[in-house]
Amino acid sequence: MAKRFRQALALTTSCLSLCDGFGADHSNSGRSIGAVYLLNLVTMYPLLELYACPACAGALTSDWSCSGCGARFEMSDGIPNLRLPSDTRSEVVRSFYEHAPFPAYPPGASLSWLRARAERSEFARLVDHAISGDARILDIGCGTGQMSLYLARARRVIIGADLARASLQLGAAAARRFQLDQVQFVETDLHRPGLREGAFDVVYSSGVLHHTPDPRAAFSRIARLVRPGGMIILGLYNTFARIPFRLRRLAAWLSGYRWIPFDPVLRDRENEPARREAWLRDQYRHPEEHRHTLAEVQAWFAENGFEYIRAYPSAMLSQESEPDDLFASAPDNWRPEGWLAQIGWIGSLGHEGGLFVTIGRRV
């Protein structure tokens, strides 16, 4: 590792005179082009061990070439492009988010705004509390990277991965504004990710797999990225909790989207047209959507060598409050109780999107 790092620095040094020789670019806090190149590479290099060639899973070198198959990749705007061509349906979803990245950042957004907004959610606070301060975290399907940036505390290293570059550019720009150098964004497809298997302590994926053509196969692919003993946090639309939304969507479609009843998010964003339109597109006009039950996700866990830990909200009717430790196993996993709990989620989760979370540990 030390030898490869010295080689990277040598490569950078050789580039500095060439970069600076054509004049300085002071658009980045007064730094020259060469200085920015050096800063980006030094920040990026320790994270190289978390990446892999998406074609053959070989190790990547400091110039983004594969030591195995020789494939070469590029990095622009500080974002490596490790995405291989996708199937038609995935390309439709990618194009959807390239046109309208989600979720958006309001004008003047700051790190304190981001953290305060995230911490209105009990779940976000529990996730932050449960993850150790030195964890290697993968936020796959990160969108504009708001969860990635929220979790960037202590000595954590976070990779935010998505297939839509427009979304990643918003996240990377926010990371620079917030001066968070422990977050790296990468363009890649979760079906053939440019990420090393077994490299991550925590893989977080929320609101993503239900937009893939085959969520079960997609889960199998990202499950390999978790190290043995590591955790996966998976957020999906629930079959039952999504029912109120599907009725709202039907009303919206019948009215030509002129009338959308009982949507609290649209009401809250009435004076924020850009964020309102982003929610409208993501929730009401998405080209690919699936819904899932807790038992279905538990079967995926068993198929891929994961122990079921718990659901959020709790799938236990007798549990009055959520646990302090999100990674602590639920005291019971009685399937009939789980079905009844999910029916109850129609009321507790249905007012927004009907998203539930399942947590597992790789054995």
Image: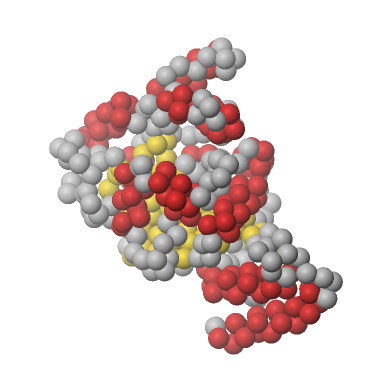
Nearer-the-camera pick, 300 or 138: 138
Q: Residue 232 at x, y = what percent?
A: 38, 55
When asked about the image quadrant of residue 24, the answer is bottom right
Q: Residue furthest right?
A: 22
| Residue at image location 79% in from the left, 74% down from the top | 20
Horizontal side of 162 relative to 313 (left or right) equals right
Q: Is residue 33 visible?
A: yes
Q: Residue 303 at x, y = what percent?
A: 38, 52
Nearer-the-camera pick, 288 or 63: 63
Quick one: quadrant of the N terminus? bottom right
The image's colour scheme reads: secondary structure
| Residue at image location 42% in from the left, 19% down from the top | 262
Quick one: quadrant of the C terminus? bottom left
Q: Is residue 6 above or below residue 340?
A: below
Q: Residue furthest top?
A: 255
Horizontal side of 338 relative to 273 (left or right) equals left
How many dots with numbers?
A: 0
Q: Is residue 328 above or below residue 318?
A: below
| Residue at image location 63% in from the left, 52% down from the top | 169
Nearer-the-camera pick, 30 or 145: 30
Q: Is residue 198 visible?
A: no
Q: Residue 98 at x, y = what percent?
A: 66, 42
When asked about the image quadrant of residue 328, the answer is bottom left
Q: Residue furthest left?
A: 318
Q: Is residue 151 above or below residue 235?
A: below
Horizontal side of 336 relative to 72 (left or right) equals left
Horizontal side of 296 relative to 268 (left or right) equals left
| Residue at image location 17% in from the left, 38% down from the top | 320
